[in-house]
């Protein structure tokens, strides 16, 4: 090709790409990143599956099945976070005999990333909870429990930030009011702070200051209270805050087949999910992020 022809064809191509404001960058392939959130709540020391003759949950649950299911999902996607929304303790003789040791060791073997603290996790006292921490390879978050005057001081963080293939995920924890649920001698000088105020601050810090792409509240305050519609709960929290993308709940043993979708103060969607109790179900929510960090999601509960 002659030099003049080459210049003419190059100029024509450049003009064509310039039409409609297009540039070469417009033809960059859209990269989609896939993040899977797996979660449990209110497992209550149920290590074994239910017996075959159980009236409600025959042959369901069990740590071995949950572990196999988790590993099969990790084989599909390397970007997985495994979370628990509290009440790990109390419910079977495993806890009565071993005080939480087995529960934490098994969760560590399943490679849980993070958990929050439920009211029943104080059932052996705050000293009992503290004594089992060496058996947990994962961390605990609770933003509205102030442990500064207790043995747990420094062992529970308000939030944790994860980076999964460039996706920045901030997770903070919330706990239920302890009065009337936990004996004072069990929680000692633990201070309970208002979850709505704390959630407002935490979500702002994670979204605005730390620039998290996804903000998750790991909650043990309950899904909804029919007799107390104004009581702070997961559904009220979703509608009364900004910057929370997902609330993973516990405490009320609410079985949801898929996440509830609500609108926050900015009219943006918030997912709220809870998977019942006793390890019968495993929650799964898949988020997809494109180059502009816009998201789409799919959520469901999986029978274990």
Image: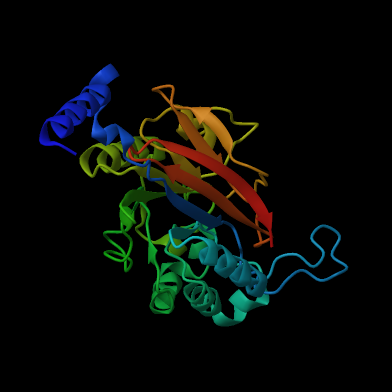
Question: Which quadrant holds the N terminus?
Answer: top left
Query: Picture coordinates of residue 255 (x, y %)?
Result: 68, 47
Q: Residue at x 34, y 50 (%)?
A: 167
Q: Nearer the viewer, residue 61 or 119?
A: 61
Question: With 276 as the anchor, is 290 left or right in this view?
Answer: left
Question: Which quadrant holds the C terminus?
Answer: bottom right
**The image quarter in which residue 87 lies:** bottom right
**The image quarter in which residue 114 lies:** bottom left
Residue 77 higher or lower than 209, as above or below: below
Residue 286 higher or lower than 262, as above or below: below
Q: Nearer the viewer, residue 279 or 17?
A: 17
For this orientation, the residue located farthest to the left is: 3
Query: Picture coordinates of residue 178 (x, y %)?
Result: 47, 51
Query: Picture coordinates of residue 92 (x, y %)?
Result: 67, 72
Query: Picture coordinates of residue 290 (x, y %)?
Result: 38, 40
Residue 227 higher or lower than 158, as above or below: above
Residue 264 higher or lower than 94, as above or below: above
Q: Is residue 232 visible?
A: no
Q: Residue at x 31, y 54 (%)?
A: 161
For this orientation, the residue located farthest to the top is: 20
For this orientation, the residue located farthest to the front is: 2
Q: Residue at x 39, y 72 (%)?
A: 130
Count of picture labels: 0
Q: Is residue 13 visible?
A: yes
Q: Nearer the viewer, residue 210 or 75?
A: 75
Q: Nearer the viewer, residue 131 or 55?
A: 55
Question: With 241 as the anchor, is 104 left or right in this view?
Answer: right
The colour style of the image is: rainbow
Q: Residue at x 68, y 70 (%)?
A: 62
């Amino acid at each position: 090709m002659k030099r003049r022809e080459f210049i003419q064809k190059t100029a024509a191509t450049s003009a064509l790409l310039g039409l409609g404001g297009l540039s070469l960058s417009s033809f960059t392939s859209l990269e989609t990143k896939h993040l899977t959130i797996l979660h449990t709540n209110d497992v209550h020391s149920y290590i074994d599956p239910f017996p075959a003759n159980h009236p409600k949950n025959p042959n369901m649950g069990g740590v071995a099945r949950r572990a196999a299911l988790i590993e099969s999902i990790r084989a599909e996607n390397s970007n997985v976070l495994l979370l628990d929304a509290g009440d790990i303790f109390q419910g079977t003789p495993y806890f009565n005999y071993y005080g939480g040791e087995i529960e934490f060791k098994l969760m560590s073997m399943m490679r849980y990333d993070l958990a929050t603290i439920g009211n029943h996790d104080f059932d052996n006292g705050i000293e009992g909870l503290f004594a089992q921490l060496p058996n947990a390879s994962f961390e605990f978050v609770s933003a509205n429990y102030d442990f500064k005057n207790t043995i747990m001081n420094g062992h529970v963080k308000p939030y944790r930030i994860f980076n999964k293939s460039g996706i920045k995920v901030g997770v903070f924890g919330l706990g239920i009011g302890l009065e009337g649920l936990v004996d004072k001698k069990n929680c000692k000088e633990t201070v309970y702070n208002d979850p709505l105020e704390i959630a407002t601050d935490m979500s702002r810090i994670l979204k605005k200051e730390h620039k998290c792409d996804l903000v998750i509240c790991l909650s043990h305050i309950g899904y909804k209270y029919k007799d107390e519609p104004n009581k702070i709960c997961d559904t009220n929290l979703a509608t009364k805050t900004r910057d929370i993308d997902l609330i993973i709940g516990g405490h009320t043993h609410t079985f949801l087949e898929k996440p509830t979708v609500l609108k926050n103060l900015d009219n943006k969607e918030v997912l709220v999910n809870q998977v019942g109790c006793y390890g019968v179900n495993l929650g799964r929510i898949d988020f997809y992020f494109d180059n502009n960090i816009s998201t789409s999601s799919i959520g469901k509960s999986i029978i274990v």
